[in-house]
Image: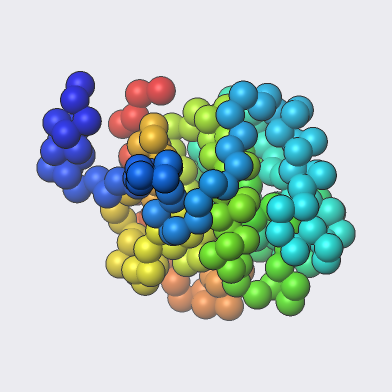
Amino acid sequence: MKQSVRKDYLAALGIETWALRSTAEGTQREDGAEGAQREDGADWAELRARVAACTRCALSATRTQTVFGVGNLEAEWLIVGEAPGAEEDRRGEPFVGRAGQLLNSMLRAIGLAREQVYIANVLKCRPPGNRDPSPAESAECLPYLERQIALLKPKIMLAVGRISAQKLLKTDTPLGRMRLKVHSFGLNQVPLVVTYHPAYLLRTPADKRKAWEDLKFAREVCASVQR
């Protein structure tokens, strides 16, 4: 199918797209970062080793360890957060502690165990003080996540939290306006749904009902996707 025709179909379905753009100097990311190293060809073991040894940005000097990701390597669902927190930095696993427990409960509510999904972050290292990731840090780390997606081939991505959604979709649109829509990520147009971060829900339990709506919507989207 021609790319122009495919874009017309996606637009008619209300699916927003993310893509690379080409320039005279070569390929450039939409966030302006040029020449970021890609991870084409790396298998899971090699990619994990590259992440563990990464020194692409200054976060390598302050981390305890990298947080690669965890879960089923044949999972249909990919859960993506923004960056590791203090406990994740200590343990080397994403979404642990109270936020992780709530995420587990959210998944169980739609019939999924933590072991059935794959969980990762946009950033593999913890920003000091849990500050928001910088554009440069996100640009340097994104190729790792892109390769994880290429290896996993998920049916759906669930972006949890404003930062994760905005970084993945290259937008500053508020989270509330991104909910209950089918977005897409990458050259393979992986369907992407946005919801609240579990840490936010712990602080704002009144929005758990909205998160439940998001999860049901994501489940419907996943059921409609052929892998």
Q: Quadrant of the N terminus?
A: top left
* Position above or below: 86 against 56: below
Residue most toward the front?
A: 24
Residue 115 image point, x, y percent: 66, 36
Above or below 39: residue 192: below
Q: Is residue 25 left or right of residue 135?
A: left
Residue closest to the eye, 167 or 118? 167
**224 to 59, vertically: above or below:** above
Q: Which of 61 and 127 is in front in this view?
A: 61
- Residue 123 position, x and y percent, is 64, 55
Identified at 22% across, 30% down, the residue is 3
The answer, for residue 108, to whether it is visible in the render is: no
Left or right: residue 130 versus residue 28 is right
Residue at horizontal 71%, vertical 68%?
Answer: 127
Q: Can residue 214 be seen in this view?
A: yes
Q: Where is residue 213 in the image (x, y as percent from the top left)?
A: 37, 57
